[in-house]
Amino acid sequence: MNIISSANVYFLTAMTIVLFSITACTRENAPSQNNNIPAYEILDTVDLINGDKFAEVLITSFSKETSQQELETTAKKIAEEINVDEVDIYCSREAQKANYSESFSKEHPNAIDECYLGNYK
């Protein structure tokens, strides 16, 4: 009887940890719900050696035609919202992938030029 009870406790504990982990991961990468910031998705975050935090953000509603002022203002708001010091903005996932993969970049030669929108501190 004690073995079954112990197994149930371990199972419930493990399931609780899994559910909290899934919730935390989903929340971190969820698009913004803030009306003052366009919908965005956090693609990656990195703690830099100098102590700063860096994030790569996808904003599919932006493009190369988006004004520099709007990009800068949005980057600042996002940086404050997600607590980072520096933000790269992309308008497509392909641009971010091409920025890190030489082979992907060769397969998608215009991805970075078309959808890497800049780095903002």
Image: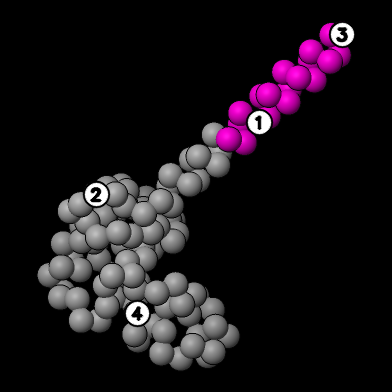
Q: Which residue is mark 4?
A: 115
As rendered, which of 4 and 98 lies closer to the eye?
4
Viewer can see residue 50: no
Mark 1 packing: few (<14 Cα in 10 Å), some, or many (20+)? few
- Residue type pointed to by label 3: Met
Report the Cα–Cα distance between label 4 and label 2.
23 Å
Q: Which residue is mark 1?
A: 15
Judge depth for marks 4 and 2 and give the one in front.
2
Report the Cα–Cα distance between label 2 and label 3.
51 Å
Q: Quadrant of the C terminus?
A: bottom left
Residue 49 point in image, percent of width and height: 42, 55
Q: Earlier in the sequence, mark 2 or mark 3?
A: 3
Q: Which residue is mark 3?
A: 1
Q: Earlier in the sequence, mark 3 or mark 4?
A: 3
> Dot 1: what SS?
helix
- Residue type pointed to by label 1: Met
